[in-house]
Image (cartoon, rainbow, N blue to C red):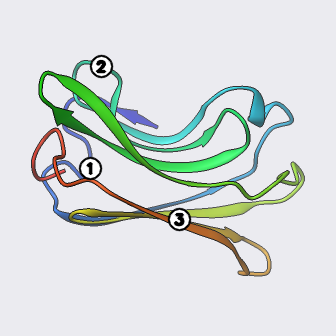
Amino acid sequence: MFLSSYGLVHGLSNFTVTAFFRPDSDYASADRFIYAESAGTGGPAMFLRLGGGGTVEFGINSLDGSSYTGHIAAISPGALDTTKWYLAAAVYSNPTIRVYLFDAATRALIGTSTASNTNPANRTY
């Protein structure tokens, strides 16, 4: 899902986005967006994605001077089973960014990662 300009979480200083997904066989070859919201220019302002290279990533762009810089929490879970479902959770609690990955069937935590963004592009996300 890609929402333009003002998405579901725009303007919130704390939120959680969760999504179930099953990776395709090519998931590690290029970015696969699970959820994204646009800042209008320069790509997504916020995203939850499978990153090229096999990572699960949650990121929020920040405005550093005149350019956007991504702040990303990334999990490297190893190879994901393309026959299984997973649950990804992206949590933003200003300024902390967290991403969690679970096995959807067993509910087992596969991994988690934390990053920080003290200067988000929209100030409130």
Q: Position of residue 124 (x, y in %)?
A: 11, 53
Residue at 21% x, 65% y: name it: 94
Residue 113 badge: 3
Residue in the image at 72% along x and 36% along y? 53
Give me the disc on residue 42: 2
Q: Are marks 3 and 1 in contact (CB under 8 Å)?
A: no
Marks counted in the figure total: 3
What residue is at 17 percent from the left and 38 percent from the top?
Answer: 121
Q: Secondary structure at mark 2?
A: loop
* 121 relative position to 3: left or right: left
Give the image location of residue 6, x and y in percent: 19, 37
Disc number lying in front (1 or 2): 2
For residue 12, above or below residue 60: below
Which residue type carries mark 1? Leu
Crowding at dot 2, Cα within 10 Å, few <14 / some 14-19 / many 20+, comes out as few
The vertical placement of 97 against 34, above or below, is: below
Above or below: residue 78 compared with residue 63: below
Horizontal and vertical percent position of residue 12: 16, 59
Residue at label 1? 8
Observer-side mark, 3 or 2, equals 3
Badge 1 crowding class, 10 Å Cα cut-off, few under 14, some 14 to 19, many 20 or more, is few
Q: Is residue 29 above or below residue 27?
A: above
Query: Within the image, what quadrant is residue 61 found in?
Result: top left
Which callout, 3 or 2, points at the residue further toward the start of the chain?
A: 2
Q: Amino acid at mark 3?
A: Ser
Residues under labels 1 and 2: Cα distance? 19 Å
